[in-house]
Amino acid sequence: MRHWGKERALKLNDVFTSKIWPFFKTLSFPRQHHRARVLFMPTHDGKMLILGSTLRDSEIAMERYRETFGTTLTIMLICRALLGLLLAHKAMSGVQRVTQTAIQIGKGNLDRRVSLQGEGFEIDTLAKAFNKMLDRIEVLVNELREVTDNIAHDLRSPLTCIRGIAETTLMGDSDLEDFQDMTTSIIEESDRLIEMINSMLEITKVKAGVAEIKMEQVDLNEIVRDAVDLFQPLAEDKRIKIELNIPPQPVFIRGDKTKLQRAIANLLDNAIKYTPSAGNVSLSLYKEGKNLKLEIADTGIGIPPDKLERIFDRFYRGNGSRSAPGSGLGLSLALALIKAHDGKITVESTVGKGSKFTVILPCSLS
Ligand code: ADP
């Protein structure tokens, strides 16, 4: 112990003051690279028994572990950083594609879409949401375009007509009666114009998905019966017989009563309008599979096969229909309203024999 010097004696202070025996301590020795684990144990004659064992083997093993793990850890960290960069690049490329598409759309290419390239859930969700938003914007822009076209072409003629009536009366040798006639005609034409504008606005709103559709439980049976009651006088005037085939019990469905009434009324109005005197109109309501079907059939003038595609277009009027009242918006509005209920309208027709319009509504609405 004497050879260990003052400094080491100080380091062994805790050995001499220890109350727990045997006492273990790890010590390093001058000029020795490795430390030793030393046991101190006082003997009964006041001496100290010191036993030590070098930690050389375990320290070498530890060094090797440290070297191996250090290298592995460094490689792992580098790999992780590279992977992070790669992932960030991949994610950013998706965001960049969304940005590029947005720039293209800004230049007027509204039909552009972001392609899905499986770059991860978040990017794919972003791309899908972006594309969905674009679909919606495209629908709205197309609607706006169509309305502008309609204003330019179809609303101009009633306005020109109103102006013509006023001009003719004003320029001619008109008396009070002529002016009264003019006023009546102008009122009639203005009413027609207002109705056209209202229908057009309603079609646009329904198609653009901004119309208020109040979904509630309604009885389709009742709606059909009410429509028949409403048009019965008109049918009687033309000696048209209306046949009604509906189930005795209510047929409940979730829908907007007013909108469904309007759609069915438009179809029934057409059936009566385009059926010559003493004809027949029938309405049949039944369930088929997952759908409810309402057939409105007539024995009227029919529709040529090449025109069947066009009858649902806004302002389309068939050649044989020009003499009948109307503006060519009835079917367009009916279709928009039924589509807003997730339904559709199909048509079968034979010229000279009659037409059958079928409204198909999903039973899931029930
Ligand atoms: P409108 O009746 O005011 O002309 P619609 O949009 O209701 O406008 O109908 C568009 C066109 O479809 C009509 O002009 C007519 O040529 C044709 N059409 C619709 N319903 C019938 C029907 N039941 N029978 C024959 N033609 C029809």
Image (cartoon, rainbow, N blue to C red):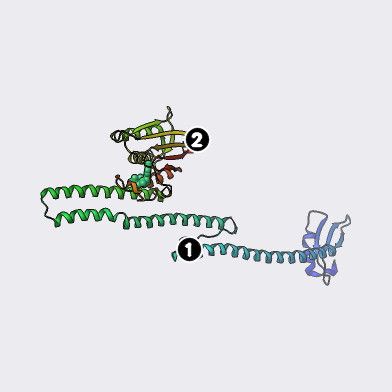
Residue 151 position by quadrant: bottom left
Q: Residues within 10 Å of mark 2 (few under 14, many from 20)?
A: few
Residue 364 versus residue 168: which sits nearer the camera?
168
Residue, x 54% and y 55% (percent of image)? 125
- Where is residue 278 drawn, in percent x and y? 33, 34
- Mark closest to the chain's N terminus, 2 or 1: 1
Is 68 in front, or is 180?
180
Disc 1 designates what residue? 102
Measured as percent of width and height from the top left, residue 178 is found at 14, 49
Identity of the amino acid at label 1?
Answer: Ala
Q: In the rendered image of this protein, does residue 14 appear above or below residue 206?
A: below
Q: Is residue 330 visible?
A: no
Q: Secondary structure at mark 1?
A: helix
Q: Residue at x 35, y 33 (%)?
A: 228
| Apparent side of residue 301 relative to residue 343 in the rendered image (left or right) | left
- In-front residue for pair 45/52: 52
Q: Is residue 289 left or right of residue 7?
A: left
Query: Residue lying farthest front?
Result: 352
Indicate the secondary structure of the residue bearing disc 2.
Answer: strand
Q: Amino acid at mark 2?
A: Glu
- Farthest residue, direction top: 248
In this rendering, the count of numbered labels is 2
The mark found on residue 148 in the picture is none
The vertical placement of 142 against 361, above or below, is: below
Report if the beta carbon of the residue with label 1 is closer than 8 angstroms to ligand 1. no
In the rendered image, residue 262, in percent from the top left (x then y), is placed at 35, 41
For ligand 1, which image quadrant applies? top left
CA–CA distance between discs 2 and 1? Answer: 45 Å
Tell me the residue at 58%/62% (across/down).
Answer: 91
Residue holding disc 2: 288
Determine if residue 338 is in view.
yes
